[in-house]
Amino acid sequence: MNDSAVTIRLDGNGRVYQPGETLSGEYLLESVPPEGVKAIEVSVLWYSEGKGDEDFAVHEFWRSDVEEGDVIHAGRPEPFNTILPRSPLSYEGMILKLRWCVRVRVFPNRGKEIVGQKTFRLGEVPAAGDPTS
Amino acid sequence: MARKLRFYEKKRGNRRTGSRTLGSAGEAVFFAVFLLLGCAGLAAVFALLVVPEWRVNHRFVAHHCTVLDKRIGHVENEDGTLYRPEVRIEYEVGGETYRIWTFDVHMAYSSGRDDKETALEPFVVGQQRSCWYNPADPSEAVLVRQASWWIWLVMLVPVSFIVIGGGGFIYRLLHWGKSAEHRAVMAQRVQPHDLFGANGGSSREFPNIPDGADITNSPGTRLKFRLPIAQSPGWVLFGVLLACLFWNGIVAVFVVTAIGSHLEGKPDWMLTLFIIPFVLVGIVLIVLFIRQLLVTTGIGPTLVEISHHPLHPGDRCRLFVSQSGRLKVNSIDLLLVCEEEATYRQGTNTRTETREVHRQDVFRREGFEVHRGLPFEAECELAVPAAAMHSFKADHNEIKWKVVVKGDVAGWPDYERSFPVIVRPGNGRVNA
């Protein structure tokens, strides 16, 4: 999911990241007037998919809030970076999948919040049932 | 036209697609109502019970009076007749004489006549007694002063409403308008990683991987650590026994009733047919119990020791297995198993599903005997797959690794005993 109003780009796009590596990239708010944004949240997080109820945990979180004196440049790419943790690694199981992503949540002054998300792989664990596993 | 506000839609577990704002507002209103009810209840308890009793004990003036009459007052309601003791007294304050029916400040009706009669016994008509009157209104007086302990119990009800309502309301306010990520970060900051095994008792170094401290706290005799068993056979036996007694105890009542009806010559065929499936389940439970009893008492303890722990993908380690008892063993197998476990809510039920994603034969021995005092012992090598996913534990999902000992014993039911192990990630890469 990558909402048209939010573009997220990761350095080394598409490659597999390793634990302890730096994940860096930038996000860009498009077609959002600068004065129309109240706050922006950027999270690096993992979440589960599959049979069980969703679990998720936030590894890194940044929030810029106009009310707290932060300046938000809506039309300008904003960089971010974080050192990735040692676990949990991305996983494609039978009833459980673990996915990592960068999620940008934009809170406009008017209307519903806008969410952009870019998934990436942490580690190279083969899918469950894969002959190499 | 898309709806702006969704009131109701499909929901499974925590996943919902309705308006979060509306949901939060609903929860806030719910807790606010709880809080208001609690406050109103507490105010009522104070106004009707605590304050009047305090006034009598601290503000009323001691005096004397003459007992003129006594009786048991009563009222009828849907629960039957309720009673209270009443004494007519005469006393004089400021030159004015007052004659009133009184007893204590509450003058409350309750069930049971005997205790009221007992309460009236000390009051003899014509006798002088102590009384306490209200200086602000001398026509109000009591013969009995008390500090009622039960008022504190009554107070627990509104106080619990206030705690639940207030706590929930403050929680909702603190999280109002905050994203799921923001709330999660707040919760992670408040909750230390290792406290009460949060995040599966994981360490900060390896988030969401159990630290396995309970696995390495028992030294082995041959190898470094003795692995704890996942479920002690004794506890399993106890659990099956409880289930068996509970189920069959209830079923037995209906069986006795049904048999009784047949013996009396008035067979209740509806009841007889109705209880048949329940009786069958009861028989299955008895068979399970006997089987577990045989496994627990007949097959001795199984010990597994490991040369190092935690494990990593591609690791090789030594395993030692010991099986006691007096057995003729057809085969014994050591396996390395990985399971995914998912917990989800379905309606009001919480269900758990387990799926085995890896099973690896580690060791097998066939056709041997175990003699009392001479346990079967063997050592073998365990190779953790290089592509293994690490152990993982979150609130609703889990990846579990375990060493399984599976036995096929002549004349006994097959048995399986599990010994959990923790697999940590290597460096994230796979050396396939």
Image (cartoon, rainbow, N blue to C red):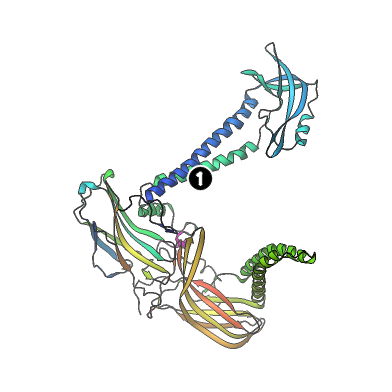
Residue B220 makes an appearance in the image: no
In the rendered image, residue B104 lying in the magenta stretch gets the answer no
Which residue: 51% across, 45% down? B164
In this rendering, would B247 be left or right of A84?
right
Label 1 lies in what chain? Answer: B
Give x and y (percent) for residue A39. Answer: 28, 49
**Residue A32 sits above or below residue A127 on the image:** above
**Residue A9 sits above or below residue B326 on the image:** above
Displayed quadrant of residue B181: bottom left
Number of labels in the image equals 1
Residue placed furthest toward the bottom: B367
- Residue type at mark 1: give it: Ile
Residue A70 makes an appearance in the image: yes
Residue that carries the numbered disc 1 in the rendered image: B164
In this rendering, would B322 be left or right of B127?
left
Mark 1 closeness class: few <14, some 14–19, many ≥20 residues within 10 Å:
some
Range of magenta residues: B198-206
The N terminus of chain A lies in which quarter of the figure?
bottom left
Of residues B73 and B427, the one nearer the viewer is B73
Give x and y (percent) for residue B77. Answer: 68, 36
Displayed quadrant of residue A69: top left
Of residues B111 and A80, the one nearer the viewer is B111
The C terminus of chain A lies in which quarter of the figure?
bottom left
